[in-house]
Image: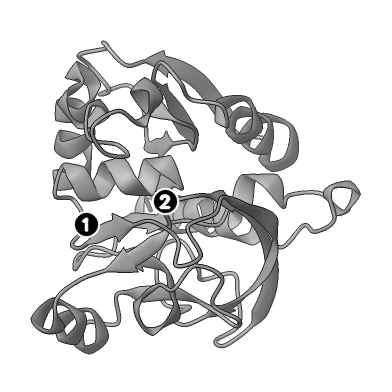
């Protein structure tokens, strides 16, 4: 499986994402600059965290207009797995691949520390290697991770089981403890915590590695050919 790590001016977690895929997962991966106009050669798309375009206007707002995002949308519509982490999640919200919006953390402070997450749905392409309701340790690093949506959208998220991860102890005020959501089709995931920073016990946790293994497992199962 071949992954693209999308790099915007201001991305700062692209190297972490690349390391997780190449060195820990053992799959192919390439950096892709934000002005690229063709992602057809990749099987999975990864939007890393950071401060794309300095977070001017709104987090992820300017990145949403990058040439590459048109291709990311095409990839998502084609059913390819698309993962947005932290700023990547914010960008997915900006382009409408996921519903809702981000607000400043409830305490109005930037937070960077490990948190406990619950796997709220282990039947997605990103969570199948986890147990349902499994508690995992993954770090956060954000100032605007307070997820919000209206009541109708929240009801839809619940009914379609689109809430993939929730916080055990909500650090930022996110609605109903939401830490990560998928689209209705289930091939796009946005999450604020950083699984790419939890892929080796030397980093304090390897719990994030199962997320990437889930992506590869799902992709391989859907691309198996039999004689």
Image-based side of 162 in relation to 76, left or right? right
Numbered circle sitting on residue 219: 2
Residue at (55, 27) in percent of width and height = 14
Q: Secondary structure at mark 1?
A: loop
Answer whether residue 80 is visible to the viewer in this image. no
The furthest residue to the right:
202
**Residue pointed to by mark 1:** 98
> What is the quadrant of residue 167 in the picture?
bottom right
**Of 165 and 144, the residue lying toward us:** 144
Could you say where residue 127 lies in the image, as x and y percent from the top left?
50, 68
Residue at (41, 36) in percent of width and height = 47
**Of 3 and 152, the residue lying toward us:** 152
Residue at (42, 77) in percent of width and height = 123
Could you say where residue 216 lies in the image, as x and y percent from the top left?
51, 50
Q: Vertically, is 84 above or below 66? A: below
Image-based side of 96 in relation to 202, left or right? left
Could you say where residue 13 lies in the image, as x and y percent from the top left?
57, 32
């Amino acid at each position: 499986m071949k992954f693209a790590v999308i790099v915007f001016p201001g991305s700062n977690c692209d190297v972490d994402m690349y390391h997780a895929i190449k060195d820990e997962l053992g799959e192919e991966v390439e950096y892709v600059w934000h002005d690229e106009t063709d992602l057809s050669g990749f099987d999975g798309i990864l939007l890393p965290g950071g401060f794309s375009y300095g977070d001017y206007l709104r987090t992820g707002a300017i990145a949403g207009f990058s040439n590459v995002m048109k291709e990311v949308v095409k990839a998502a519509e084609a059913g390819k797995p698309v993962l947005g982490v932290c700023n990547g999640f914010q960008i997915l919200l900006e382009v409408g691949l996921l519903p809702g919006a981000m607000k400043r953390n409830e305490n109005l402070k930037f937070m960077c520390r490990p948190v406990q997450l619950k796997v709220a749905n282990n039947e997605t392409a990103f969570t199948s290697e986890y147990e349902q309701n499994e508690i995992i340790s993954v770090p956060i690093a954000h100032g605007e991770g307070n997820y919000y949506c209206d009541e109708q959208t929240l009801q839809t998220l619940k009914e379609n089981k689109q809430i993939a991860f929730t916080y055990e102890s909500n650090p930022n005020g996110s609605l109903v403890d939401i830490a990560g959501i998928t689209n209705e089709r289930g091939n796009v995931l946005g999450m604020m915590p950083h699984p790419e920073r939890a892929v080796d016990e030397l980093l304090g946790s390897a719990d994030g590695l199962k997320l990437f293994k889930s992506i590869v497992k799902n992709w391989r199962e859907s691309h198996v050919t039999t004689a």
